[in-house]
Image: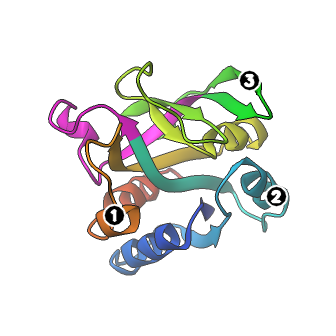
Amino acid sequence: MKITILTPMEVEQEKVFSALSRIPNLKHTYEVLVSGIGRESTAKALLNLPKHDVCVLMGFAAVVGKISQVPTHLALGKPIEITAASLYGYEGGLFENGKPIHVEPKLSLPCLSSLTSDKFVRTTNLAAGTVVNMEDYTFMYLKKPQDFIVRIVSDFLPHEREIDFFDEVKGIDFLEGVLALEQIDV
């Protein structure tokens, strides 16, 4: 099976390549592409994909909640599957709300809901365990039925201290997430 993995950022692509290089005898063939950050970049990437059997959006996940209070399956570096996505945007003083999209899980990973926004979202009123990003809703809206999203927990919102995101994610490994893709039946 040919799996195309889209990553919003190059650092995520590098982590996927690193994970793939450590798996002997891969069951599937992979192409790993950087889509770019945001709804528009994701849409453009999905419209220009090379031939594949399954497309997976894989990237970091900012999860609402305190690191000391989340369950172990949401620890830093743990993979999750996004099975629900909604849209919340603010542009030019207008709020827009996308109708939530729900899908069945494709993997045996913990499943979370995702909130996509054009702007930074203040997390005070969001349920703990919600993933916040800029791409999931667009991917869910435009994807094919067999496609899905895997996110790797990278940080927790609201941040209790100011962070350098790229420094924070240096030690996060995508191996467990890529191994989950290897379990897809041909």
What is the number of the mark on residue 169? 1
**Can you see residue 1?**
no
Q: Which residue is mark 3?
A: 95
Apparent side of residue 166 relative to residue 77 in the rendered image (left or right): right
Q: Is residue 2 above or below residue 79?
A: below
Q: Which amino acid type corresponds to the residue marked 2 in the rendered image? A: Lys
Residue at 56% in and 31% down: 115
Label 2 packing within 10 angstroms: few (<14), some (14-19), many (20+): few
Mark 2 or mark 1: name the one nearer the start of the chain.
Answer: 2
Residue 81 located within the stretch drawn in magenta: yes
The mark closer to the camera, 2 or 3, is 3
- Residue 141: where, in percent of width, then height? 75, 35
Residue 100 located within the stretch drawn in magenta: no
Q: Locate residue 133: give its quadrant.
A: top right
Is mark 2 in CB contact (under 8 Å) with mark 1?
Answer: no
Q: Which amino acid type corresponds to the residue marked 1 in the rendered image? A: Val
Mark 1 or mark 3: name the one nearer the start of the chain.
Answer: 3
Residue at 24% in and 34% down: 66
Q: Which residues are magenta?
A: 63-85
Q: Which residue is mark 2?
A: 44
